[in-house]
């Protein structure tokens, strides 16, 4: 199977970037192609949820987060916690593209002795703030980061990307109570609301709705957005108060489609939490992603 990592071009590094809508959409398409490539490298992967989170992650990493890949430990950087650790397949290509490590290293993804496993390891990979995989713990750790910012008088924000199935974990709601109790306005939670978890549809297993109202009842400002509408995502994340003076944590519920960009995955989200691709499916996926609509402005 052909691998295409030699085609990756590293983006300019810096604290953040200010891509327009068309540039962000092009970048999201590029990252989706890399997700398919990584699935080929590993032989399988949590591809559906990686594809559903792509647009949100692209907006954050190419427009919102104050980061400097040349200084991964910069004390004033914004923190991003991938609480749905199985989404590492969708995060690694972004970190490589932003310049945290050489993109060709991803050729070792999920291989023996590679530092890139299916779940991210903060001790091995620059840009990873927390080792995740066991669901439900990212928000609690983010609270510690947000409290540390307050204690040290620093202005960084902490963004936490959670899965919707993950929100069935009791620890998520314990953490939600705590963030509101301590008035942590420098935390932004993001939920990849693709409606599916490993065992099926979320509402058939442990219904989450009304999800936004639940977060509001726990003391959060809750917002909903189409997680694949780049203009809406940019407008929402650009509008968020930076948290320096606010006292209420914020959560963005991004309504997404599992397997976004690949037709056969979108039509059967339940089957693509974790899976492998045949040669024909790889080529179909690449064609579908290449044909995704991109704004011309």
Image (spheres, helix red, strand yellow):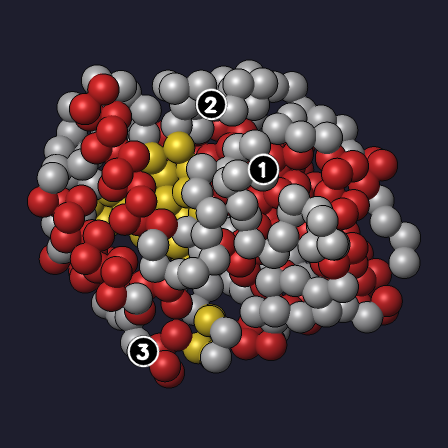
Cα–Cα gap, marks 3 and 2: 39 Å
Q: Residue sitting at 41 percent across and 51 percent down?
A: 83
Q: Secondary structure at mark 2?
A: loop
**Picture quarter containing residue 29?**
top right
* Residue at the far left in the pictured view: 181
Location of mark 3 (residue): 206
Along the line of sight, the residue nearer the viewer: 218 or 267? 218
- Quarter of the picture holding the C terminus: top right
Q: Nearer the viewer, mark 3 or mark 2?
A: 2
Q: Nearer the viewer, residue 131 or 39?
A: 131
Circle 3 packing at 10 Å, graded few (<14), some (14-19), many (20+), is: few
In the structure shown, which secondary structural element does the residue marked by tag 3 occupy?
loop
Residue extending farthest to the right is 2
Q: Are marks 1 and 2 in contact (CB under 8 Å)?
A: no
Residue under circle 1? 125
Q: Is residue 115 left or right of residue 18?
A: right
Which numbered disc, 1 or 3, marks the residue closer to the eye? 1
- Where does label 2 land, which residue? 73
Determine the CA span between mark 1 and mark 3. 34 Å
Question: In terms of image quadrants, where is residue 78?
Answer: top left
Q: Are discs 1 and 3 less than 8 Å apart at CB?
A: no
Which image quadrant for residue 259? bottom right
Q: Position of residue 111 (x, y in %)?
A: 74, 54
Residue 194 visible in the shown view: yes
- Reply above or below: 173 against 62: below
- Estimate how packed mark 1 is, as few (under 14), some (14 to 19) or many (20 or more) residues with alpha carbons within 10 Å: some
Earlier residue among tags 1 and 3: 1
Farthest-out residue, bottom: 204
Sequence-wise, the earlier of marks 1 and 2 is 2
| Residue 143, percent from left and from top | 25, 41
């Amino acid at each position: 199977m052909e691998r295409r990592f030699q085609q990756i071009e590293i983006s300019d590094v810096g604290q953040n970037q200010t891509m327009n809508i068309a540039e962000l959409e092009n970048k999201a398409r590029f990252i989706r192609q890399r997700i398919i490539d990584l699935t080929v490298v590993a032989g399988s992967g949590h591809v559906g949820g990686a594809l559903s989170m792509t647009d949100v992650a692209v907006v954050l990493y190419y427009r919102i987060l104050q980061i400097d890949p040349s200084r991964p430990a910069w004390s004033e950087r914004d923190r991003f916690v991938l609480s749905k650790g199985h989404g590492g397949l969708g995060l690694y290509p972004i970190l490589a593209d932003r310049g945290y490590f050489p993109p060709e290293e991803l050729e070792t993804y999920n291989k023996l002795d590679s530092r890139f496993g299916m779940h991210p390891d903060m001790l091995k990979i620059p840009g990873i703030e927390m080792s995740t995989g066991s669901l439900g713990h990212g928000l609690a750790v983010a609270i510690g980061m947000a409290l540390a910012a307050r204690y040290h008088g620093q202005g960084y924000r902490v963004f936490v990307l959670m899965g919707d199935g993950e929100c069935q974990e009791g620890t998520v709601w314990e953490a939600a109570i705590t963030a509101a109790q301590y008035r942590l306005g420098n935390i932004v939670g993001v939920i990849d609301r693709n409606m599916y978890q490993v065992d099926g549809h979320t509402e058939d297993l442990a219904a989450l709705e009304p999800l936004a109202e639940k977060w509001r009842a726990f003391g959060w400002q809750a917002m909903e957005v189409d997680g694949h509408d780049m203009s809406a995502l940019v407008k929402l994340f650009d509008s968020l108060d930076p948290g320096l003076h606010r006292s209420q944590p914020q959560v963005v519920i991004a309504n997404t489609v599992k397997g976004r960009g690949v037709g056969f995955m979108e039509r059967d989200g339940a089957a693509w939490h974790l899976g492998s691709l045949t040669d024909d499916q790889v080529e179909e996926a690449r064609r579908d992603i290449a044909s995704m609509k991109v704004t011309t402005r």
